[in-house]
Image (cartoon, rainbow, N blue to C red):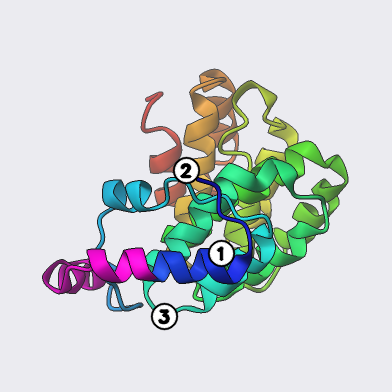
Amino acid sequence: MTLGANPHVVDLLRERFTAAADPQRAVAMRAYMRDQFPFLGIPSPQLKVLLRGVSPTDLKATVLALWNLPEREYQYAACALLRRGVKSCDESFIGTARHLIVTKSWWDTVDTLAAHTVGPLVARHPSLVNVMDEWIRDDNMWIARTALLHQLGYKESTDPERLFRYCLERADHPDFFIRKAIGWALRQYAWVQPEAVRAFVKANEGTLSPLSKKEALKNVG
């Protein structure tokens, strides 16, 4: 069954999620996320089951409506629907992606949006590289983190010049989430080009934070 109109999709998901809610589990999930958001208590495998058959015709409207609901599982559902449907999004969707990143921001949704929405958008629409060049310098930490992480799934298609440049541009950022993202982005590329990452870290040993260096070299020594 494919569900079309946005209100019907959102209403259906609210019915399914409410029926599946586990208040006891919700307490633990909320605590794990440092009490940033309320939860219904639906684990990830069950969430996937509840999303079966859901393919909204108006993806943008559905995602925005889900994002406005209070419980975190609705944002997870939005991210899952985007992951399935991002191929149908044109380059203008980058504005919606930015809105999602800066609204109810935390690593769980930001990282998913970076790798599975923004990354594919930039890959399909190369003009959006210019937007990433702007985002890496953004004062919003989560926007900068997204720029650092958007190539996570690119593997051999990674642009190393851009990756290394972004890492150096934000190497002096004091926040844990940026320093961790630098290391994660480098570590991911190290699966493809370990020597290039090792050489980059060595050449910039005095610039990169200890956390970034540790994360970058986890799998290459």
Q: CA distance from mark 1 to mark 3?
A: 31 Å
Residue shown at 58% from the left, 72% from the top: 7
Q: CA distance from mark 3 to mark 2?
A: 30 Å
Q: Which residue is mark 2?
A: 184
Lower sequence index among marks 3 and 2: 3
Q: Which residue is mark 1?
A: 173
Amino acid type, callout 2 = Trp
Residue shown at 85% from the left, 52% from the top: 130
Q: CA distance from mark 1 to mark 2?
A: 15 Å
Q: Which residue is mark 3?
A: 70
Q: Residue furthest right?
A: 127
Q: Secondary structure at mark 2?
A: helix
Q: Residues within 10 Å of mark 2 (few under 14, many from 20)?
A: many
Residue shown at 40% from the left, 71% from the top: 14
Lower sequence index among marks 1 and 3: 3
Asked if residue 25 is among those painted magenta in the image, a careful observer would answer: yes
Residue 114 percent location from the top left of the image: 58, 51
Amino acid type, callout 3 = Pro
Amino acid type, callout 1 = His
User: Observer-nearest residue: 144 or 169?
Assistant: 144
User: Observer-nearest residue: 27 or 15?
Assistant: 15
- In this rendering, would 123 be left or right of 38? right
User: Observer-nearest residue: 61 or 92?
Assistant: 61
Q: Which residues are magenta?
A: 15-32
Lower sequence index among marks 1 and 2: 1
Q: Secondary structure at mark 1?
A: loop
Residue 56 percent location from the top left of the image: 61, 55
Q: Residues within 10 Å of mark 1 (few under 14, many from 20)?
A: some
Q: Is residue 69 above or below residue 109?
A: below
Q: Quadrant of residue 77?
A: bottom left
Q: Secondary structure at mark 3?
A: loop
